[in-house]
Each structure stands twice: as structure tokens, then as C-alpha cells.
Image (tube, rainbow, N blue to C red):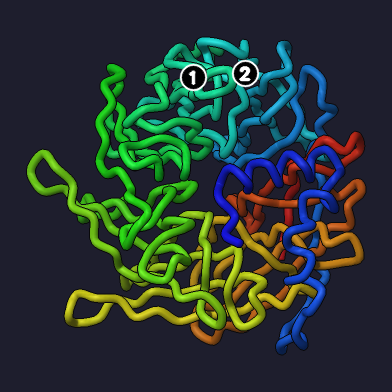
């Protein structure tokens, strides 16, 4: 079974509600027959919880990536909580010892201003924090309380502006991921089967004035279905991303969108084949100085427990793919949904499951040349957090920051720091 991003969001909410066993029933057969563990290493990294959400006015369910400013402040979103229980944009200010000081920059009002933000915020060129919500807005109902919005928030004043309200038609709905900038224009995706001309998701652009255009509407065929949780913009002005479904083997794709005049041309760089190849990517891509692309997949790999993959450009303009690492579902973790962080020749990321007795996920690193994997931390489901979905942000002094959607003091998720 291919897990759509709608199901991915549902799994995050189920983990948050501590009913993971019910949500994971469809994966039971796959996980019950784990293959032998590959050669891997485990080290005792220093993990520290910086903040535990209470689920009240401070927010809850931190299904978010983190943005870092020059002063070391961290910014992100919570799906629920806040003044109106519809999610927040928060800031964490560094302290000599945890907990860091949390302040809510904005509490969503559940209606025209948006509801339930996923994925975090991105600093735009003017220092605003921009992101998306999966529902709310004034564009339509989409069977719930709005089709979602793209928003911009001024951190100093807490003033929010809705740049676009999705209507659930050709423009898609329920974006639920971060945005990428090229000057004043931001880009993002909507998942399948959430809208678009073919009901398979879209890649969209939104101007600062709120004008939206569709760069590509996925068909669900060879071009894939459902865009990734983040887009990568390279110097060529091309956008790179993944689709979670579709493609020649119905296991997802890696694509490039290139500007051609006022239009965009989609090129499928690779179509995943499924086990023992990779399958079903959710996170975005990272690139090294040679143009190699790296990412994770939820399924696939030698054990169908997920993978880390690499795409290398060849002289003919194509790409060669290899699975760098196949997760085994034991101490190494399984089912990664994160975008990787590249530091030198090492890839850092999170696995959403596996790792210990509770299967609450791991932090790992993979050598980009050899594919050797090291588990840096296995979450225990208690005070250290549980279920990291959105990867890591690298800060100063070789410190990485991340979030969990559950666990912590109140079981409402955490922000953590880790030094490998």
C-alpha cells in the first residue's frame, strides 16, 4: 500500500494522540518480517530536550521543520494549540540551560487566516516567516474547514497576512509543507489526491501580491502524483522535488521543473522501482557541490523499511540512482520522511519509526560515499520525545536541532538538540 501525504498527516496525528498501534496496523505485516540487520553502528550522542509543548496556548504536535536565525533563535509551527487550538507559529530563544524560552508569535484563528500548519516556516528575503496551513482560509470548504492557505508573518509584530487561499480546484488544497523562495516568488506543492486539474496535486507559485500560478499539475501517471514536502531551488533556477506516488513503477519519482519562457517543463529524473530499490519519498532533496541529489524514502530498500538514496548526473544529461542505505527496522530505525541535512560528506536525518522498544524513531547519519549508517539517538517515547518526522537543522558548534510530534513532559511533542 502506498501511503499518501494525507495518510502521512493522519499518522502524525495518530502518533500525537498516542494511538500509533491503530494507525500502523496496515504496516504490521511489513514490520513483522524484518530482515537481518545490516552492518551498522550506534553511538551515544548527546541529545537534549530544549522545550516540551504542553498542548495548551504554547502549542502542541510539533510536526515542523525548524528555521534558525543569526542569534540562534529557532522558529517553527505546531499543528494544534495556541489561543484558538488551531495551531501556532512559535519562537524558541536560547538559554544557558533548558528549557529555552518559548513565545507564540501567532495563534491561528481557525478560519480565514488558516488552520493547522504543518512543516514549519521559511525566512523570506525581507525577514518574514512564510508557510502554509492544511485547512482554513476563505477559498472553499474542501470537505472540512477551508482548503488551506499560504501565509506570511512579520516576526517583530506578529502580524499575519494570507497570500493565497486555496479553493480546492485546479490550484489544489491542503498544502501542508514548507515553501521555497526565488526572490519575491515562493513555490510549494499540494499532495495527492488533494486537488489540481487531475486531482493528483500541483506545484504552485505565489507572488508577494498574492497572485498564484500553477507550474505543474500532476497527472498520476509517469510524471508522478503528489509533490514533496519541500522543493529545492538550484542556481539553474530549476526546481527539484519528489512525488510520493505514480511514475513508471507507481513508486514515486524525482523530478525537475525548468523555466521555459513563461511556462515550466517537467522532466522525470528517476522513477523508483520499489524493493530492493527505493520507494515512496516524502521529504525533499539536498544537493552537494557536484550536483548529486540525496533523499529518503518511506518504503523500499532491501527490507522495504525505507532508504537513503543518491542520484548522480551523467554526461548524457540523465541520472544514475543508487540506494546508499536500506533501513532494517531495528536499532537503525525505519520509514524516514525527512529531508536530509548535508554537512561535509555526511548526511544527517531522522527516521519516523524503529530504533528501540517503542519504535519511536531515530536520529541517524550516513556517509555519502560508503553508505555506512550510524544511529546517533533512539527515542524512548518519554521525556526525550517520540516520532521525528521533519529532519534536522544544523546550527553552530556542530549542533543539530529537530522536533518530535509526540513525547516530552506532556506527550505533546518536543524541540531537541543533538551533538553527534
The C terminus, quarter of image: bottom right
Q: Secondary structure at mark 1?
A: strand
| Residue found 77% across the figure and 49% down from its top | 23
- Crowding at dot 2, Cα within 10 Å, few <14 / some 14-19 / many 20+, comes out as many
Residue 405: % across, % down: 74, 42
Residue 411: % across, % down: 88, 38
Residue 381: % across, % down: 88, 52
* Front residue (pair 235, 68): 235
Looking at the image, can residue 336 be seen? yes
Looking at the image, can residue 157 be seen? no
- Crowding at dot 1, Cα within 10 Å, few <14 / some 14-19 / many 20+, comes out as many
Up-down relation of residue 345 to residue 64 (above or below): below
Q: Earlier in the sequence, mark 2 or mark 1?
A: 2
The answer to the question of whether label 2 and label 1 lie on touching residues, with beta carbons closer than 8 A, is yes
The N terminus, quarter of image: bottom right
* Front residue (pair 142, 65): 142
- Label 1 sits on residue: 153
| Residue found 11% across the figure and 48% down from its top | 260
Residue 24 numbered tag = none
Farthest left residue?
Answer: 261
- Asked if residue 33 lies left or right of residue 133, the reply is right
Residue 212: % across, % down: 28, 26
Residue 313 image-quadrant placement = bottom left
* Front residue (pair 147, 116): 147
- Label 2 sits on residue: 105
| Residue found 62% across the figure and 79% down from its top | 326
| Count of marks, rendered view | 2
Residues at marks 2 and 1, CA–CA distance in whole angstroms: 9 Å
| Residue found 72% across the figure and 84% down from its top | 40
- Asked if residue 40 lies left or right of residue 4, the reply is right
Q: Secondary structure at mark 2?
A: strand
Up-down relation of residue 329 to residue 206 (above or below): below
Amino acid at each position: 500500500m502506498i501511503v499518501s501525504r494525507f495518510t502521512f498527516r493522519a499518522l502524525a496525528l495518530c502518533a500525537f494522540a498516542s494511538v500509533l498501534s491503530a494507525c500502523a496496523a496496515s504496516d504490521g505485516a511489513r514490520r513483522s518480517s524484518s530482515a537481518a540487520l545490516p552492518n551498522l553502528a550506534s553511538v551515544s550522542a548527546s541529545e537534549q530536550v530544549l522545550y516540551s509543548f504542553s498542548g495548551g496556548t504554547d502549542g502542541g504536535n510539533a510536526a515542523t521543520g525548524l528555521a534558525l536565525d543569526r542569534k540562534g533563535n529557532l522558529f517553527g509551527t505546531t499543528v494544534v494549540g495556541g489561543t484558538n487550538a488551531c495551531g501556532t507559529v512559535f519562537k524558541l530563544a536560547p538559554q544557558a540551560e533548558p528549557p529555552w524560552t518559548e513565545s507564540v508569535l501567532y495563534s491561528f484563528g481557525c478560519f480565514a487566516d488558516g488552520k493547522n500548519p504543518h512543516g514549519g516556516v521559511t525566512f523570506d528575503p525581507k525577514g518574514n516567516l512564510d508557510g502554509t496551513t492544511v485547512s482554513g482560509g476563505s477559498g472553499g470548504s474542501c470537505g472540512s474547514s477551508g482548503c488551506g492557505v499560504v501565509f506570511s508573518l512579520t516576526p517583530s509584530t506578529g502580524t499575519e497576512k494570507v497570500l493565497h487561499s486555496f479553493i480546492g480546484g485546479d490550484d489544489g488544497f491542503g498544502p501542508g509543507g514548507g515553501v521555497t523562495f526565488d526572490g519575491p516568488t515562493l513555490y510549494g506543492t499540494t499532495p495527492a489526491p488533494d486537488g489540481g486539474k487531475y486531482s493528483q496535486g500541483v506545484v504552485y507559485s505565489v507572488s508577494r501580491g498574492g497572485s498564484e500560478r500553477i507550474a505543474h499539475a500532476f497527472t498520476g501517471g509517469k510524471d508522478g502524483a503528489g509533490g514533496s514536502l519541500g522543493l529545492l531551488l538550484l542556481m539553474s533556477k530549476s526546481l527539484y522535488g519528489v512525488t510520493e506516488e505514480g511514475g513508471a513503477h507507481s513508486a514515486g519519482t524525482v523530478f525537475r521543473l525548468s523555466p521555459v519562457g513563461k511556462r515550466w517543463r517537467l522532466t522525470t529524473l528517476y522513477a523508483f522501482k520499489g524493493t530492493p530499490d527505493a520507494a515512496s519519498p516524502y521529504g525533499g532533496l539536498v544537493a552537494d557541490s557536484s550536483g548529486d541529489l540525496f533523499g529518503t524514502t518511506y518504503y523500499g530498500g532491501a527490507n522495504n523499511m525505507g532508504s537513503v538514496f543518491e542520484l548522480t548526473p551523467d554526461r548524457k544529461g540523465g541520472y544514475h540512482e543508487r540506494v546508499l542505505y536500506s533501513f532494517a527496522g531495528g536499532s537503525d530505525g525505519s520509514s524516514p520522511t525527512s529531508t536530509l541535512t548535508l554537512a561535509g560528506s555526511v548526511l544527517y536525518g531522522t527516521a519516523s519509526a524503529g530504533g528501540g522498544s517503542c519504535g519511536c524513531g531515530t536520529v541517524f547519519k550516513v556517509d555519502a560515499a560508503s553508505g555506512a549508517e550510524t544511529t546517533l539517538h533512539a527515542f524512548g517515547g518519554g521525556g526525550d520525545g517520540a516520532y521525528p518526522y521533519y529532519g534536522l537543522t544544523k546550527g553552530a558548534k556542530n549542533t543539530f536541532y529537530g522536533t518530535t510530534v509526540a513525547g516530552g513532559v506532556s506527550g505533546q511533542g518536543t524541540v531537541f538538540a543533538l551533538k553527534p
